[in-house]
Structures are given as C-alpha cells and as structure tokens.
Amino acid sequence: MLPVDFFIFLQIILFLFITPGPPRVVIISHSLNYGLNRSVWTAFGDISANICQGILVVFVIGTFLKDNPQALNLIKWAGILYIVYLAYDTYTTKSISIKSKSKNLKSKFSFYRDGFLVAGLSPKAIIFFGTIFTSFIDFSGNYFAQFIILMTTYVLLDFTTLMIYGFAAEKVSVWLKSNPKILNTISACVLLIIALYVAITQNY
C-alpha cells in the first residue's frame, strides 16, 4: 500500500530536484572539471547523506530540530563554509588540458565526501524531511514500510536528476576544456554565488 498522497509527494520532489541547489551545482562543477564517471561518486555521497538525514529526522531528532532553530543555523553556516572551501579547491585545482593524459589525484572518496557534506549540511533538506516528508507518513499504520517507499522514491529520483545535471555539464565541458583555467574560475564563481544565496535567503 502506497503512503498518503504518494503522487503529490512525487510532484513535490520532482520540482525540488529540477531546481538547482548546492548538490546540483557541486555535481555540475565536478562533471565539468573531472567528468561524469568520477562525479557519480558525488551523487552517491549526496544520496547517502539524504538517507541519513531521513532516518535521523523522522526517527530520532525531528522534535529537537523543530524546538531549536539555532541548530539549523549552525548547520547552515557549516554548509556555507564547506561550499566556499569547494569553490577555493576548484579554483586552485591544477588545470589539465583536454589533450593531457595525466590523471587528477582527487580520489573517489573525495568526490563522495564532497557530495555527502554538501547535502548533509543543508538545513533545507533537513527541514524537508522534518516537515514535508513526514506529512506523507501515516504514523498510525506501518510507518516503517511507508518510510522505505518514500525514501526509495526520493533517492532514485534524486540520483537520476543528479546524473542528468552531470551528463549535461559534461557535454558542455567539451568546448570549455580547451581553456581549463576559465572552466575552474566559472565553477568556483557559481559555487560562491550559491553560498551567498544560501547565506542571504535561508534564515531559521
């Protein structure tokens, strides 16, 4: 049996996923600079963080976060600082020509970590799980089964849209890679804009 208003839930998360946020900007940046094959680990990090957030908010700390908005502010600024760090890391990354055969030293774990921390330190995602997500669960029934259905749907759609963003970015990068320093600068600037946007618009 599907959770309450399951198809409304689908519409909400699809709208959420097609709206560019920090995780999508990060995977675009990684895909532009390193290619989609490596950036898939960024997506794995993102969905891993979302699963952890869902479990923690729904089953453990949901009430605490509602009663302590200052905790969300701390998470918000930690996320902003990490995005700024990613912007710096992207800008200072050694430029590699499209003709170069050398491999970048950034590890799979680094991509995974970036995706996990950017998504995990997003107050917007935590609020989503604490408010919108839980509103589609009937806690008088088998809420664990409902949680599994909703979370599986969320993760599959999140991963799919991240890959679409990454694929599109990789295609665009073909003509940008002839001047990789410009590519790094553009990616870093977009990350800084996202950090500034989060700082100004997300208040708790």
Image: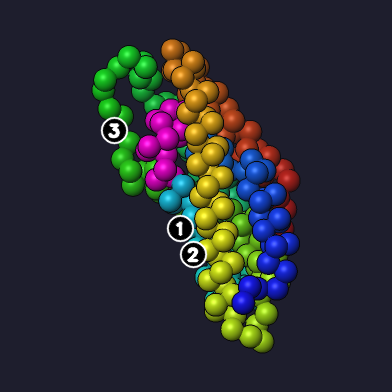
Whether the residues at callouts 2 and 3 have beta carbons within 8 Å, the answer is no
Badge 1 crowding class, 10 Å Cα cut-off, few under 14, some 14 to 19, many 20 or more, is some
The residue beneath circle 3 is 105
Q: Secondary structure at mark 3?
A: loop
User: x, y percentage for residue 61?
Assistant: 57, 74
Query: Mark 3 or mark 1, which is nearer the start of the sequence?
Result: 1
- Label 2 near label 1: C-beta < 8 Å? yes
How crowded is the residue under tag 3: few (<14 C-alpha within 10 Å), some, or many (20+)?
few
**Picture coordinates of residue 149, whole percent (x, y):** 56, 69
Find disc 1 in the rendering and name its residue: 48
For image coordinates 61% across by 61% down, the residue present is: 126
Q: Measured from the top left, where is residue 110 in percent x and y?
A: 36, 43
At x 30% / y 17%, what residue is drawn? Answer: 100
Nearer to the camera, 170 or 125: 170
Q: CA distance from mark 1 to mark 3?
A: 23 Å
- Dot placed on the residue nearer the N-terminal end, 2 or 3: 2
Residue at 38% x, 37% y is 37
The image position of residue 106, as x and y in percent, is 33, 36
User: Which amino acid lies under the numbered mark 1 shown in the image of this protein?
Assistant: Ser
Magenta extent: 29-42
SS type, badge 2? helix
